[in-house]
Amino acid sequence: MSFSIEVKEEITRNEYTLAEKKVFLSAVAKINGVLRMSNRSLMLDIRTENAKTAKLLFLIIQELYEQDSRLLVFKKAKLKKNNVYIVQIRNQVDKIMEDLEIRKEGELEPLPSKTLINNEDTTRAYLAGCFIASGSINSPKSKNYHLEISTHSQKHAEFINKTISKFDLNPKTIKRRNNYVIYLKRSEEISDMLKLLKANNSLLKFEDERITKDYFNFNNRLNICEVFNEVKTIETANRQIKEISLIMGNGKDYLLDKKDKIIAEIRMNNPEANLQELADIYIENTGESISKSGINHRLRKMSEIAREIKSK
């Protein structure tokens, strides 16, 4: 089972008030509804590939409008050959569509009004219906985070985008073929969206995988930095050893004081040591204190001497 299906099935198990069921049904019918004529009668087909979604829609229609809609099942002829469920409304179609604010005065696609969506709970329910109808979300184990909702109407896409934005999220909208897609890519915003949809179990799973993946990525970056620092330390040490050898080989060691010579010897004998380790060895061997910056200062002094020798 994909993560998208897990999220959708969790949404169908939520408890909704009558007002919330109405806006939920409105959102699903708005995106997945197909209006058609049969035997001179108007019918509304609401399609879904999820059996639990179809059952929920069937029960909501029965509860809100006291009529038995038909539940049809077909199998796709192409691709994965999944079942397609059609919840079919055959009676009082005009009245129901106007009540759901899908059709108004004979015109299709009016946006839901503030009367229909009148508080935060009904807003959440509407977004839940939109996600049930056409939403998808990448598995938290996948490389990229992505949650989207698509709709065929540009005005409806703008409405969904604006509605999501009210919850301090920053969705983007693009046109993909004949649909408009509203999407989120930041993991934190996707977590907030799952919370908004009341998919709490899915949220916990998403967060658990996200934290695990982020921790792994952090450790991986940390290991890369450590390797880089080790390589850099060795390269620097090799350069310093060559510079000290150049000074000694050209009889210029008189330019070094006693402390310089001790540090030079320690560096020659410890090619893999970093500055702090060189300072620790110096303190252990001499009983005198010296800082990491003190070691660095004297090694830079030797570099200057070696540079002068090379220039001559």
Image (cartoon, rainbow, N blue to C red):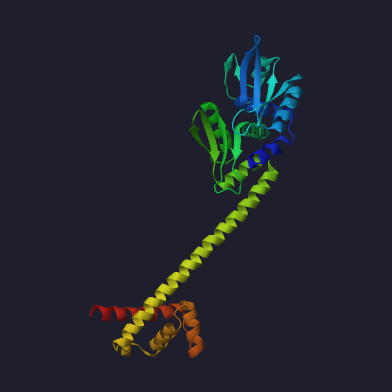
Corner quadrant of residue 52: top right
Corner quadrant of residue 238: bottom left
- 127 shown above or below 98: below
Of 20 and 243, nearer the camera is 243
Q: Quadrant of the C terminus?
A: bottom left
Q: Is 267 on the left-hand or right-hand side of 53?
A: left
Residue found 53% across the figure and 64% down from its top = 223
Q: Is 184 on the left-hand or right-hand side of 242?
A: right
Q: Position of residue 305 (x, y in %)?
A: 30, 81
Residue found 60% across the figure and 38% down from its top = 136
Of 148 and 1, nearer the camera is 1
Q: Is 304 on the left-hand or right-hand side of 216?
A: left
Of 303 and 244, nearer the camera is 244
Q: Position of residue 33 (x, y in %)?
A: 62, 23
In this orientation, does residue 112 appear? no
Q: Quadrant of the N terminus?
A: top right
Residue found 56% across the figure and 42% down from its top = 146
- 3 shown above or below 241: above
Q: Position of residue 232 (x, y in %)?
A: 43, 70
Tally the marks: 0
Q: Position of residue 19 (x, y in %)?
A: 71, 28
Corner quadrant of residue 89: top right
Q: Residue placed farthest to the left in the image?
A: 312
In this orientation, does residue 31 appear? yes
- 101 shown above or below 142: above
